[in-house]
Amino acid sequence: MMTSNIFKWIGTLFTEYLFTPFNVLRSDLALKEFGWWISNGVNWLFMIVFIFLLRYWMKESYRFKREGTEDRAQ
């Protein structure tokens, strides 16, 4: 019984509180003049962060490979 209450609480946490900014974007801002641009701005922000982190990871991987400290255990 307690387990189902925990999952209900987690569901309520996400649907009522954590997704509120996305609901505002979807319902209020999407109907205005620049709604499409604002809604997709969130996606572009995630893409920029992903590309930056991927670039950093590849740079560090190349550095470890160049120094010979990469763990190549098979």
Image: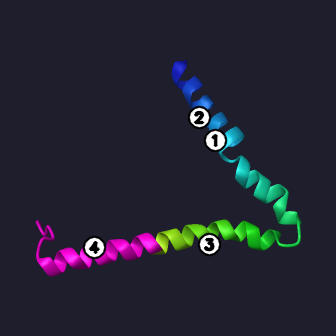
Q: Are marks 4 and 1 in contact (CB under 8 Å)?
A: no
Q: Earlier in the sequence, mark 3 or mark 1?
A: 1
Residue 50 position, x and y percent, is 48, 70
**Mark 3 and mark 1: span between their CA atoms?**
23 Å
Report the side of 61 relative to 39 (left or right).
left
The amino acid type found where label 3 is placed reads Trp
Residue 28 position, x and y percent, is 85, 57
Q: Looking at the picture, tell me which residue is in the foreground, 51 or 3.
A: 51
Is residue 55 found inside the magenta-colored segment of the image?
yes
**Disc 1 element:** helix
The residue carrying pointer 2 sits among few (fewer than 14), some (14 to 19) or many (20 or more) residues within 10 Å by Cα, namely few
Is residue 61 found inside the magenta-colored segment of the image?
yes
Please give the residue where the numbered disc 3 appears in the rendered image: 44
Identify the mark at residue 60; answer none if there is no mark: 4
Report the side of 13 relative to 37 (left or right).
left
Q: Residue at x 34, y 71 (%)?
A: 57
Q: Find the residue positioned furthest to the top.
A: 1
The residue carrying pointer 3 sits among few (fewer than 14), some (14 to 19) or many (20 or more) residues within 10 Å by Cα, namely few
**Mark 1 and mark 2: span between their CA atoms?**
6 Å
**Disc 3 element:** helix
Q: Quadrant of residue 59?
A: bottom left
- Magenta segment boundaries in residue numbering: 52-74
**Mark 2 and mark 3: span between their CA atoms?**
28 Å
Q: Nearer the viewer, mark 2 or mark 4?
A: 4
Please give the residue where the numbered disc 2 appears in the rendered image: 10
The amino acid type found where label 2 is placed reads Ile
Q: Earlier in the sequence, mark 2 or mark 4?
A: 2
